[in-house]
Image (cartoon, rainbow, N blue to C red):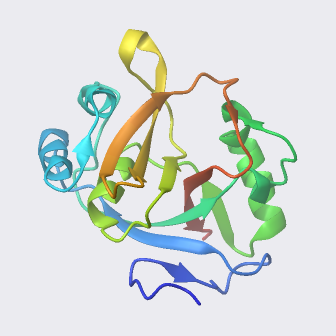
Amino acid sequence: MPRQDRFIVRDEPFSKRGPLRTMPITIGGVPKDKLLEQVKGVRYVSPYAERIMRHENFTTLEKPASALLIVLTPKDFGFTQMAYVADLLHTDRLLTWSKENFDGWEVTTVPAEVGPHLAIQYTRQPQDEFLWMAMDRIPGYAGRPYLFYIERDDDEVNSLDAHWMYPAAPWPLHYTVAFRLRKLS
């Protein structure tokens, strides 16, 4: 039975694939320094996540906007062995896959600010969930490309973290990744 959480919606009608996990979220409207403070108010923020939030490539929308996230794994995309980060996040592949699996919707990468906003808004994250953001990588320590992830570990500590992911970094088939789901006009 699905969890009774207003933040998670299942069985979306636009899917040719059956039940999906989607999450509505509000992004934007918060300057990045204030956004960092807000995340620290509800989660542990690693030094790596803080570093990329302070990077010039990390931006936030001036005004609030709604977005719909969809949680998928490399296996959902048809990978049968570990997927490389660059392949999983490739725009053309996402577009082709969307056309094959959705009527009138497309899966895209997310703006980097989704990670911190989701860290704040996802208050009932399940224990042991590790959720990556499908975003453009931002340089972090030593200029390495980083991605955000949010986690609630087995000690029930909620965190916003980041890890360096070079283009050929392999992702196991079970990794959960948040993408943006957009209605085509």
26 relative to 31, above or below: below
Q: Indicate the position of residue 16 as horizontal and vertical percent values.
A: 79, 78
Is 63 situated left or right of 183 in this image?
left
- Circle count: 0
Is 117 situated left or right of 15 in this image?
left
For the point 38% across and 52% down, which residue is it?
114
For the point 47% across and 78% down, which residue is it?
8
- Tell me which corner region of the image, top left, top right, bottom left or bottom right, holds residue 117: bottom left
For the point 66% across and 26% down, which residue is it?
169
Q: Quadrant of the C terminus?
A: bottom right
63 relative to 101, above or below: above
Furthest residue toward top? 142
Q: Indicate the position of residue 30 as horizontal and vertical percent values.
A: 17, 52
Q: Indicate the position of residue 65 as horizontal and vertical percent values.
A: 32, 64
Is 125 situated left or right of 28 in this image?
right
Q: Quadrant of the N terminus?
A: bottom right
163 relative to 132, above or below: above
Is 81 situated left or right of 19 in this image?
right
Furthest residue toward front? 155
For the point 72% across and 78% down, which residue is it?
15
Nearest the viewer among 77 and 5 is 5
Furthest residue toward right? 80
Q: Indicate the position of residue 107 as horizontal and vertical percent values.
A: 64, 58
